[in-house]
Image: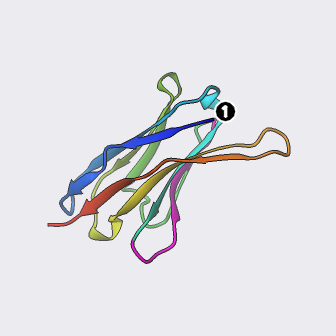
Amino acid sequence: QVQLVESGGGLAQPGGSLRLSCVHSGSAFSFYVMGWYRQAPGKQRELVAGITSGGSTNYADSVKGRFTISRDNAKNTVYLQMNSLKPEDTAVYHCNAELRPGLQKYTYWGQGTQVTVSS
C-alpha cells in the first residue's frame, strides 16, 4: 500500500511563494505518474500539474509560468514550487500517484495540505 504525505502548505501573501513536497512511501516511485490537484471550497478538485516517469510535465492554464512541478526519484519525492501566488490559488492541495501496469490502474491520494493566499 502506497502512502503519500504532503507538506509545505501554509499562509502566503499575494505575490509570495511556497513549495509543496509529497513523499511516496512505496517502491518503484520512478515508474509512477505524479500530480498535484487542488480543491477550493465549493469547487471541484482540479489538476494543477503533472509529471510523468520520464519527466514530461503539464500544467493547468491558470498556473502556467508561475508553478513548477519536479521530482527527485532518489528521495521518492515530488515538489510543487508555487511563485507569484494569487488569492485564487487558495485551496487544499493533494498529491496523486498513478501507475498503470498493463490494463490495471493504481491510484493513490495524499491527505492534502492547505494553502491560503491572503494579505
Residue 50 is inside the magenta segment: yes
Look at 32% across and 65% down and name the residue there.
90
Q: Is residue 94 left or right of residue 116?
A: right
Tell me the magenta residue range: 41-54
Q: Is residue 54 left or right of residue 21?
A: right
Q: Residue furthest bottom?
A: 42
Of the 4 image quadrants, the one containing the C terminus is: bottom left
Look at 62% across and 25% down and name the residue there.
27
**Residue 118: image x %, image y %?**
19, 66
Vertical arrangement, residue 77 with respect to residue 18, above or below:
above
Look at 18% across and 60% down and name the residue there.
13
Vertical arrangement, residue 58 with respect to residue 106, above or below:
below
Disc 1 element: helix
Q: Nearer the viewer, residue 63 or 110?
A: 110
Q: Residue furthest front?
A: 1
For label 1, the residue is 31
Would you call the spot at circle 1 few (<14 residues within 10 Å), some (14-19), or many (20 or more)?
some
Q: Residue furthest right?
A: 103
Q: Quadrant of residue 79?
A: top left
Q: Nearer the viewer, residue 22 or 85?
A: 22
Of the 4 image quadrants, the one containing the N terminus is: top right
Residue 96 is inside the magenta segment: no
Q: Nearer the viewer, residue 89 or 107?
A: 107
